[in-house]
Structures are given as C-alpha cells and as structure tokens.
Image (tube, rainbow, N blue to C red):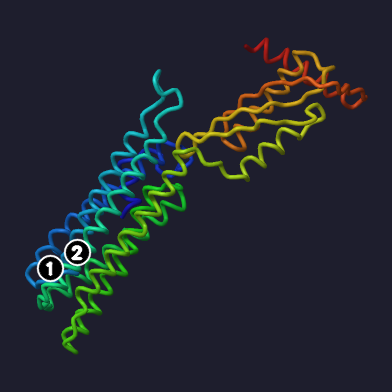
Amino acid sequence: MFNFFASKFIKDYKNIENPYTRLKLISLSSTIAIIINIILVIFKLSVGYASNSSAIVNDGFNNLSDTVVSLMALFGSKFSQKPADKEHPFGHGRSESIISLLVGILIMYVGAKLFINALHHYALEDQTEFNLIAILVLILSIVAKFYIYFLNKRLYNQLDSDLNFGVMVDARNDILATTGIIIGAILESKFNIRVDALMGLILACFVFKPGLDLFKDSIEYLIGQRVDPEIEKKVGEILMDNNFIVGYHNLHIHEYGKGHLDGSVDVEISQNLSLLVAHQLITNIQKEVKDKVGLNLSIHLDPTYTILIDEEIDKQIKQLEKQAKNDYEDF
C-alpha cells in the first residue's frame, strides 16, 4: 500500500539517495501513521471507558501521543526540505533532530502520565469489564500496529531516519503492551485477579523508555557528536591515495541533516609542486570525496620540505598540468 501511494505522490520515489525524496517518504509514512492512530484512538477510548479498563484507556492515550509524534515527524520532514538560505547556508536538515528531541520529551511525558493514571486506577480498585468487542478492537489494533512497525522499520533501515525509528519503536511497544492487555483481560476474567492496573504500569514503562533513548540520541547529535569513524577512515584513504600528499591533520566533519556532510582538512603537500598542479590535485580529491563519501570537503594546503623527484612522479605532474589547462580552457 505504501509503495502505491509513494508512486502516486512522490516523483522518482525509489531514488532514496536524494535527500528530498527521503524527506518526502518520511512525510508520507507519517501521514499514514496519523490516519491509523486517529482511528485507533477513537475506538480504544470508547471501548476503554465503556469497559472501565485503565490499560485500554492508557493504550488509547498512547495512540493519541503516537498521533502527535507522527504529526511532529510530518512537520519535521517538511521543514527539513527547505533549501539553504542566507541565514541558514547549510540548509535546514537538523530540524529533523530538533523535532526528534521534542518527540522524545513528549513520549517521556506521556509515559510518566500513564504511570500515574495506572497507580490511581489501582488505588480506586475499580473492576474492569472486558467484552468481546473490546478484545476485537485490541486485536485489530495489534494488526494495524504491525503494519506501522514493519513499514517504519523498512524506512528506518533505508533512510536512517530517527523520526521513522521513533514511530517504529512506538509501534513495537504498542504491540507488546496491547498483547499484555489481552492476556491480562483473560487472566482477570478467568481467575478473578486484578492485573489490569499492572498492565497499565507496564505500558507506561514501555512508553517512557524509548522516549528517553530518543531524547538522549537527539541531544548527542545536536551537541555535535563525532560522525561515523568509517567515514573519516574513507576520507583519509582518499587523501593519501597519491604520491604528493605526505600527511593530513585537523580533519573535521559536520553533519547538517542526513545526507548533508561538510568538512575541512589540512593536507601536507610536497613543496616542489607548482600552484597549478597542487590546485588540480586538490580539485580531483574534492570531487572523489564528494562522489564516494558525499562530503563537501574544504582542503587547506600546508607545504612541507619534502621534495619529490622521480620519473613516474614527473609524468603524473605533467598529467595534472595538462588536466588543469584543459579544465581552465573549458571554464
């Protein structure tokens, strides 16, 4: 179903390497999750209040929070699509992480609120009255959440989106919690033991934990955590894959949203290279880094006392000079 809607509303929807296609896919998945969660909220709150079930009511409000989460994911993906401007030269890609941070706070708040509500329900000693309709609503909820879970898991693996991860974890926890509610309902009706409030407490913990994890991950990203060391390693290999650069230092890489990397580095280069050759060498390296890593890399030259004299190296220098002259003429 998702691929059908994606093909209808997103041009070139299979090109997930395109940052704008990626954000549009996140927006579409958020919209679908919003619609499903609104339906679940209506049914669960109606059945929960009718059956006097704290667990079902909590599950309904959890779906309401899921709706808000999906709305925030939709807003975050839309805002992240805005191009760079004068005030934001690196674009708006980090909006996704800001929204993820707010989503984490919201999920933690809902989890704490549900925990308090479950304790209150236990203190009142209200008797839960489950019926066949309530059980059917919960089963349908599990089926719907399985769809949301697998959809967002696939998109998270493809797009590496914290927003899809948040929705995926919510769906997984809903599946476990709702299954627990059904088991609790059966135990309560068969053995006359009160487990509904306990299930409400467990649900509250399931809600709170992923919110805390998402909050911590978003904070680390916004503070400026180190990018994947494999990216740094790949850049280093490209920098040193020639006979002219003898070393490098001060490699800094910054991520401004998924798929948008900018960085800078100082390279130590042989002093006997002409400015024309050195410039062409650096231009070639920048293109290679961009093509293989997706990084916009600014390179500063530090001439060293190393002097390279060799027939093969002399041939490479002449090739770079020729390439530089050709590029200049084309320009």
Q: Is residue 40 left or right of residue 253?
A: left
- Say what amino acid the circle numbered 1 marks: Gly
| Quadrant assignment, res 189 | bottom left
Question: Badge 2: few (under 14), some or many (20 or more) residues near its Cα, within 10 Å?
Answer: many
| Quadrant assignment, res 96 | top left
Q: Is residue 222 above or below residue 107?
A: above
Relative to the observer, which residue lies in front, 147 or 303?
Answer: 303
Secondary structure category for the residue under label 2:
helix
Secondary structure category for the residue under label 1:
helix
Q: Is residue 129 left or right of residue 199?
A: left
Q: Is residue 292 above or below residue 327?
A: below
The residue under label 2 is 58
The residue under label 1 is 48
- Say what amino acid the circle numbered 2 marks: Asn
Tell me what residue is drawn at x 37 percent, y 57 percent.
210
Say if mark 1 contacts mark 2, CB within 8 Å.
Answer: yes
Residue 44 position within the rendered picture, expressed as x and y whole percent measured from the top left: 15, 64
Residue 135 position within the rendered picture, expressed as x and y whole percent measured from the top left: 17, 75
Q: Quadrant of the C terminus?
A: top right
Tell me what residue is drawn at x 40 percent, y 48 percent.
162
Q: Is residue 324 above or below residue 179?
A: above
Q: Quadrant of the N terminus?
A: bottom left
